[in-house]
Amino acid sequence: MSLEVVRLHLAHLGIFNEVPVHGFVIKHPRAGAILVDSGVGWGDEQLIKEWKVVNRHAADALAEHDLSPADVKIVINSHLHFDHCGQNAVFKHAPFYVQRSEVERARNDGDTIEWFDFAGARFELVDGDAEIAEGVRVVATPGHTIGHQSVFVDAADGAAVMIGDAAYTADIYAKGEHADLSEWPGQHSDRHAWTTSLKKVQAMRPHSIHFCHDVRVL
């Protein structure tokens, strides 16, 4: 079974290297649409102003692919920073697959906690690598945060990975531990774990790598 991955343009961060914010939909013939990351939410005006967010409704991005929020049956959050879980509540009917350690970290940090830890949010907590649906699996890639995960999909031309923030850009992915991160504060909270995770993904030899903050696909 080969699965299609489509990219959603969900936001733009004007302050942070002028980067896009992407989510992804895995079109699964049996499990239904699986959303990977939900972009930036609304309501925290200070954050939106500080980051110079140009925001977009997930429903509008989905509509470009003939989908609606109701079509999304599963949500996978690579991690729980504000630009990856901000519109989770749009999909409150779906379970959220997140690493257990990431939920604990995010709750302790408390930043934009209302965007993911809202009343009725249904978490499916994951400990390490796990299969989410046939042909879709999460792989623990700590380093950006302690509970970061990437998503591997069996696509028509080989394995595709939605790498989340395990590498912000194609250049960082390619150069790995030798990448110049001087303009990318926050790429890692633990450099050793981040380097190990990047090597882990590279060793799995994905056919295509999809980035949350880079329009290029490797």
Image (cartoon, rainbow, N blue to C red):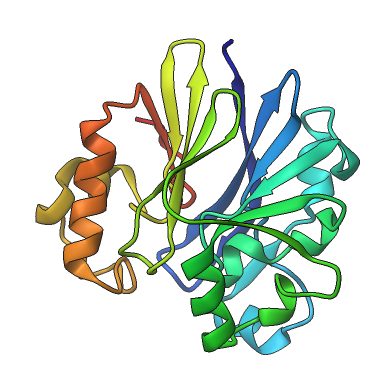
> For the point 60% across and 18% down, which residue is it?
3
> For the point 39% across and 26% down, which residue is it?
208
Q: Quadrant of residue 146?
A: bottom left
In the drawing, does residue 141 fall left or right of residue 74?
left
Measured as percent of width and height from the top left, residue 28 is found at 70, 23
Measured as percent of width and height from the top left, residue 152 is found at 46, 33
- Residue farthest toward the front in the current orientation of the protein: 127
Q: How many marks?
A: 0
32 relative to 170, above or below:
above
Front-lying residue, 14 or 106: 106
In the drawing, does residue 16 fall left or right of residue 89?
left
Image quarter (top left, top right, bottom left or bottom right) of the N terminus: top right
Measured as percent of width and height from the top left, residue 132 is found at 60, 37
In the drawing, does residue 135 fall left or right of residue 185?
right
56 relative to 198, above or below:
below
- Residue farthest toward the left in the current orientation of the protein: 178
> For the point 56% across and 67% down, which residue is it?
80
Image quarter (top left, top right, bottom left or bottom right) of the C terminus: top left
Q: Quadrant of residue 180?
A: bottom left
Front-lying residue, 192 or 24: 192
> For the point 74% across and 28% down, which residue is it?
31
